[in-house]
Image (tube, helix red, strand yellow):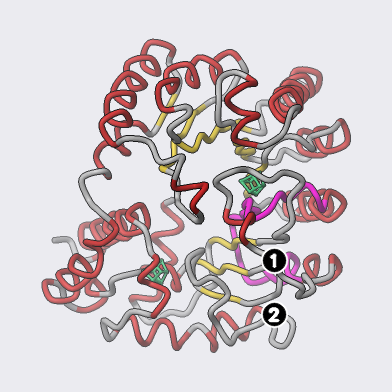
Amino acid sequence: MKEKIERIANWMKGRKVGPYTIELNITNKCNLKCRMCWLRNFSCSRKEIENSKWIKIVEEACQLGVKEFRIPGSGEPFVKKKLVLEMVKIIKKNKRKGLIITNGTLIDDEVTEVLVKFGWDIVTISIDGPVPEIHNFIRNSDHAFQKTIDGVRKINGYKRLYGKKLPYLRMNTVITSVNVNKLEEMIELGYRLGFSEVLFQPITVFSEEGRKLLPKKKDVRDNLKKVMKKAESLGIYTNAKNLLKKGSIKAEDLPKLWKKVIETNDGFLKIPCYEPFYNIVITPYGEVGPCAVFGGNSSLNVCSTNLKNIWYEGFEEFRKRLRKGEMFDFCKNCCVPIFLENERIREVLRREIYGR
Ligand code: SF4
Ligand code: SF4
């Protein structure tokens, strides 16, 4: 975390440095069809980047100085198991940090052995119910719960076998109307399965079906309070407290809050968003942008330009506009956690660099 701020501080002092994090969205394909997933309304005939190209991107990113590689679940990464395992080996041989987000149903012995042996850092596994009936309903699958639990147990088994602490296991639960009253049980499940933390996430609505899964705000608040107590009693980390705090800011307030940042700060501190100063995101089709929200809305593509040029030249346009206090069209889809992370970065810069 300290190094992330240092990278941003370098830009502030006029020194151009490489990105700290990279997000590799290797596929939009998934073996499941969850009820709330954006993929249910998504069809695309475009060809995703070849595996060999992804490997080159990982190698280039290492040369560029990326410290943290994220392989998120825009689809299910392990539908491209061979590619993921090759990436894991290269990333860890280069002594970088790695995080992957998965639905856990495709974690087999081969996957587990590579993750554990190569010391992969974090595996985030999505579980949306404490019992098969709830999880499988959300996942639209009869066997998803059991497969995911088996996957978690496999990782724990290999960790014990090789005497390793990593990967660190994180459980992620999307709060819906069908699990909102069972959030305490999610903590108990996470504890029993050896997760180090259980994170909750508000549902993002992409469809009518997703809208039906929206929980009542009061139920969310009441149950997150119970979660905090349960997590404390079991000694397991959760983000319930942060979520309760974030709930007080709404996404529709963001334009007003950005305006205030721009008007009440000066110099580098008036930049409303620092993402293009430390982060690169690549879609399955090669488009490159500064954050997960850009949604492919960019003329930069790794199939036509190398990563170094994109970072040092292509991204200058994003940085220039943000320095002037201008946002992008896609910023209207931004979310509260990103805003709060930028606030946190600004405060650290103010304190440690400006000494204010
Ligand atoms: S597992 Fe994840 S990517 Fe796959 S359908 Fe469910 S929510 Fe979407
Ligand atoms: S969408 Fe959000 S994270 Fe992306 S550039 Fe805009 S403010 Fe930054």
Residue indicated by mark 2: 302
Asked whether, in this view, residue 252 is left or right of residue 212, the answer is left
Quadrant in the picture for residue 27:
bottom right
Question: Which of labels 1 and 2 is toward the front?
Answer: 1
* Residue stretch rendered in magenta on the structure: 57-80
Is residue 102 toward the left or the right of residue 247 in the image?
Answer: right
In percent of the image, x 55 and y 25: which residue is there? 129
Please state the horizontal and vertical placement of residue 47, each as a whole percent of the image: 79, 73
Helix, strand or loop at label 2? It is loop
- Occupied quadrant, residue 59: bottom right
**Which residue is pictured at 41% across the width and 27% down the height?**
180
Front-most of 196 and 174?
174
Q: Is mark 2 within 8 Å of ligand 2?
A: no
Q: Which mark is residue 43?
A: 1
Q: Residue at x 38, y 64 (%)?
A: 334
Image position, residue 244 (x, y; %): 27, 36
Q: Nearer the viewer, residue 171 or 203?
A: 203
For disc 2, the neighbor class at 10 Å (few under 14, some 14 to 19, many from 20) is: many
Is 64 a magenta residue? yes
Q: Image height check: is 115 above or below 299?
A: above
31 magenta-colored: no
* Residue type (three-letter) at the residue carrying disc 1: Ser
Vertically, is 233 above or below 275?
above
* Badge 1 residue CB within 8 Å of ligand 1: no
